[in-house]
Image: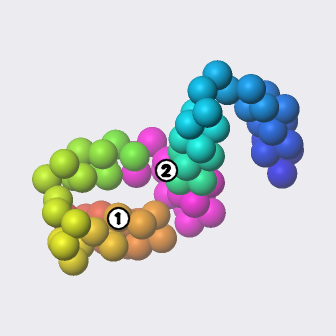
Amino acid sequence: MRPTKLGMKNWLFVGHPQAGQRSAIIYTIVQNCKTHGVDPQAYLQDVLERLPHMKTTDPDLRLLQPKLWKQNRASF
């Protein structure tokens, strides 16, 4: 809770209208990783390396969610 409250004041003026939304997306991904016991840096590195090679119809796309990634990362 404390990092979120401190961030609210710091991110009040982020410089660009879309920057606040982008910050919220990154913060949500990192928090999801922490919730599911996943190292955020390892997760982001792995997912960002795989995404360019995947298609939106790829059935494995769902496995990139932090809650499923932890269980299935060795199978890729």
Marker disc for residue 23: none
Task: Give the spatial CA distance, label 2 vs label 1.
Answer: 14 Å
Residue under pointer 2: 39
Residue at position x 85%, y 43% from top?
A: 5
Looking at marks 2 and 1 on the same chain, the residue that comes earlier in the sequence is marked by 2
Residue at position x 74%, y 26% from top?
A: 13
From which residue to which does the magenta span run? 30-43
Q: Residues within 10 Å of mark 2 (few under 14, many from 20)?
A: few
Question: SS for tag 1?
Answer: helix
Question: Percent x, y for residue 9?
Answer: 84, 32
Q: Along the line of sight, which residue is nearer the eye, 12 or 53? A: 12
Q: Residues within 10 Å of mark 1 (few under 14, many from 20)?
A: some
- On the question of residue 75 being in view, the answer is no
Mark 2 vs mark 1, foreground winner is: 1
22 vs 59: above or below: above
71 vs 16: above or below: below
Residue at the far front: name it. Answer: 17
Question: Percent x, y for residue 6?
Answer: 84, 36
**Residue type for callout 1:** Leu
54 vs 12: above or below: below
Q: Along the line of sight, which residue is nearer the eye, 74 or 60? A: 60
Marker disc for residue 64: 1
**Residue type for callout 2:** Asp
Q: Along the line of sight, which residue is nearer the eye, 32 or 26? A: 26
Q: Judge from the rendering whether residue 21 lies leftward or rightward of residue 71; answer left or right.
A: right
Q: Assign the C terminus to one quadrant of the image.
A: bottom left
| Residue 32 within the magenta-colored segment of the rendering | yes
Question: SS for tag 2?
Answer: loop
